[in-house]
Image: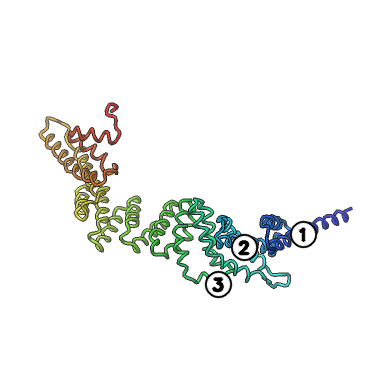
Amino acid sequence: MKKVILTVSLFVASVSVFAQQSNVKEAKSIIEGTNPDFAKAEQLISAALKDPSTMNDPAAWNIAGQIQSKVNEKENTKLYLKQPFDTTKMYNSILEMYQYFLKCDELAQVPNEKGKIKNKFRKENADIMLKSRSNLLNGFVQYLNSGDSKKALDFFKTYADSRDYPILADAKLAQQNDTILNQYAYYAIAAAYRDSDYELVKKYAPEGMKYEKNASNCLQILAEVYKAQKDSIEFLKTVQEGVAKYPSEKYFLGSVIDYYSSHNQNEKAMEFADNQLKNDPNNKFMVFVKAYLYQMMKDYDNAITYYDKAIQLDPAYVDALSNLGLTYVLKAQSVSDKATTNVNSPKYKQDQAAIKALYEKARPYYEKARQLKPDNKDLWARGLYRVYYCLNMAPQFEEMEKILGIDSTKK
């Protein structure tokens, strides 16, 4: 009885093997015809690739790749003849072809029972892949523009990684200066960053940094990835690299300062600012930063001095104007906190006059900021609201209430 069961099992297995081998041959025959039915060929080969009897047969994967090569060839012919063609099918066929040929090559490189490798597919398939390789980037752009960044990145990764594919080793792609790859890498890592695919950003950011026009932006995205991952060591290392390479780039300068400030290292932040100003004394941004650090340290007099210097370097420096107004307000508050509340004290009038004088000094800077950036209310509205209130400027104060959407009846 056991012998009968074994015989039946072997018979069924042999039938399955024969059926799938037949599918592979039929699929091959279809695509070699004059008017191939690609849908049928794909159906046949798909079954063969899933069946245990043929799923490890390089010939089956080769035919799968050949089918996609023929599909691509047909769509390209339509394009050449200015006939309607399927853009999606044209690009997807290349991506799938790469995947199938890679698997074919992997299986064909497995030594036989005698320990020998007989890969009869490599040369022909490599030639086909190389001819279509540039269109992987076109597929990347196509899907990126359509909003499908995940699929777009599949195309980009295939193009970039193909430099190291064993099947394409003879082309020595990794040794070539691929400026197109470097240029497109920026758009790839920007898309990956939006998708929170941080590992992809880290892998390909160095490629983007080889293209000078996008190099700074790529380094900034890489820094933001380390920030998102809370990797403070790599973040600081990256922004410091940015300062060294792009000393005038505010992002890197500000990021170093923010890092030191957020880690309660104000002395290092000030030292960094001073070093930058040694190299460029008229760097208005670093003068602004130095003022900001003094402001955070509640050294309002020095903050005022440096904000004033930044404004002298650039009279339209809105952030400096706004912050100088804020510094006077903060100083007024500091004086107010220490002022006497005894109205009968001779010092009361003196303290109130000093407080009022500081609000008066704040007012023109906020008003100048409003004049320069009327749409950016964050720079001036709250500040003027406070100033006008403290100076008893009722009409102006009421205007600020309306701008800020404050209902005075509910106060």
- Of labels 3 and 1, earlier in sequence is 1
Taking depth in this image into account, of 247 and 231 the one nearest to the observer is 247
Q: Secondary structure at mark 3?
A: helix
Q: Quadrant of residue 209?
A: bottom left
Structural crowding at the residue carrying mark 3, measured as other residues with C-alpha within 10 Å and reported as few (<14), some (14–19) or many (≥20)? some
Residue 198's x, y, as percent?
A: 48, 54
The answer to whether residue 206 is seen in the rendering is: no
User: In the image as oriented, which residue stretches furthest toward the right?
Assistant: 1
* CB atoms of marks 2 and 3 within 8 Å: no
Residue 142's x, y, as percent?
A: 51, 56
Q: Quadrant of residue 242?
A: bottom left
* CB atoms of marks 2 and 1 within 8 Å: no
Residue type, label 3: Ala
Residue type, label 1: Val
Structural crowding at the residue carrying mark 2, measured as other residues with C-alpha within 10 Å and reported as few (<14), some (14–19) or many (≥20)? many
Task: Determine which residue is flagged by label 1.
Answer: 17
Residue type, label 2: Ser
Q: Secondary structure at mark 1?
A: helix
Structural crowding at the residue carrying mark 1, measured as other residues with C-alpha within 10 Å and reported as few (<14), some (14–19) or many (≥20)? some
Which circle, 2 or 1, is nearer the viewer?
Answer: 2
Task: Determine which residue is flagged by label 2.
Answer: 69
Q: CA distance from mark 2 to mark 1?
A: 26 Å
Q: Residue at x 72, y 57 (%)?
A: 52
Q: Residue at x 25, y 54 (%)?
A: 290
- Of labels 2 and 1, earlier in sequence is 1
The answer to whether residue 374 is seen in the rendering is: yes
User: In the image as oriented, which residue stretches furthest toward the left?
Assistant: 346
Q: Which mark is residue 171?
A: 3
Residue 386's x, y, as percent?
A: 23, 37
